[in-house]
Image (spheres, rainbow, N blue to C red):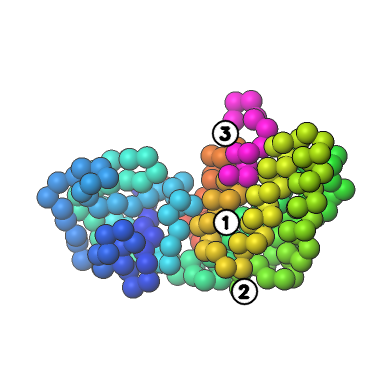
Amino acid sequence: MTYYKFLGAGRVGPFSGHVWSTDWLETTEVSPCHRGLYACRVTDLPYWLHDELWSIEFDGPVTVVGRKVVGRRARLSARVSEWNPDTSAAFARACVGRTAGHAAAECGDLDDGHLAEAAERLLASPAGGSPPGPGPLTGLRELALRRQETAARAGRQPAALVCGYLADAVEMASTYPAPALGYVAARAAQARRPEPGGDRHDEERRWQADWLVDRLRLTTGD
């Protein structure tokens, strides 16, 4: 199994402050959430986004603890150069697009297709470049707020709530880091009307993980 680890600039652990390297690092014991060396599976990646992404090698067994894995001995293997400011911005853009898509789906006949068009434009935006700027987001926050008001007056509370998330996402897009936009998209999905047998929040996080795997060309198996 291939594992990954997000680190701050300069290979710094965001919680421990430890500077990682390709040399083996070892702890005397493993106590989940207290002691140990942590990494994540590809499905966990959207929860841990940071400046640098590295593949990580464990020597010995690992234990799955929630949305991470922990082991006793590990080292960095190789940096994933495809994760950089451009792909981070592209991920944020895609998450705004996904939020717009959730708003369009929940509004249904309350919208005239403009929300769906905005979602398509954002999801089709080319990779790279700066965070979403005036271009693809022009007027989208105002549109989201209008649809929110229309949905509230019609008693469509889930639609109103998702449109509110979209308005927030657009406002955050130029200043907040990519993880925040991923969080908003997942919350917007969760705010929609329940889907029998499904969990929209988890489905959205899986979509984000698949986006990262595809865009960063990550290894997902042994």
Question: How many neighbours does mark 2 have within 10 angstroms: few (below 14), some (14-19), or many (20 or more)?
Answer: some
Residue that appears at 42% across and 54% down: 48
Residue 186 picture location, percent across and down: 57, 46
> Would you identify the image quadrant in which residue 192 lies?
top right
Relative to the observer, which residue lies in front, 156 or 196? Answer: 156
> Mark 3: which amino acid?
Asp
Compared across the picture, whether 115 is left or right of 7 comes to: right
Question: Residues in magenta?
Answer: 187-198
Q: Is residue 139 visible?
A: yes
Tell me, yes or no, whether the highlighted magenta stretch contains residue 88: no
Tell me, yes or no, whether the highlighted magenta stretch contains residue 195: yes
Residue 147 picture location, percent across and down: 79, 48
Mark 1, residue position:
181
Q: CA distance from mark 3 to mark 2?
A: 33 Å
> Mark 2: which amino acid?
Gly
Question: How many neighbours does mark 3 have within 10 angstroms: few (below 14), some (14-19), or many (20 or more)?
Answer: few
Classify 14 as above or below 159. Answer: below
Mark 3, residue position:
199
Q: CA distance from mark 3 to mark 1?
A: 19 Å
Give the mark nearest the N terminus, 1 or 2.
Answer: 2
Q: Mark 1 near mark 2, Cβ–Cβ under 8 Å? A: no
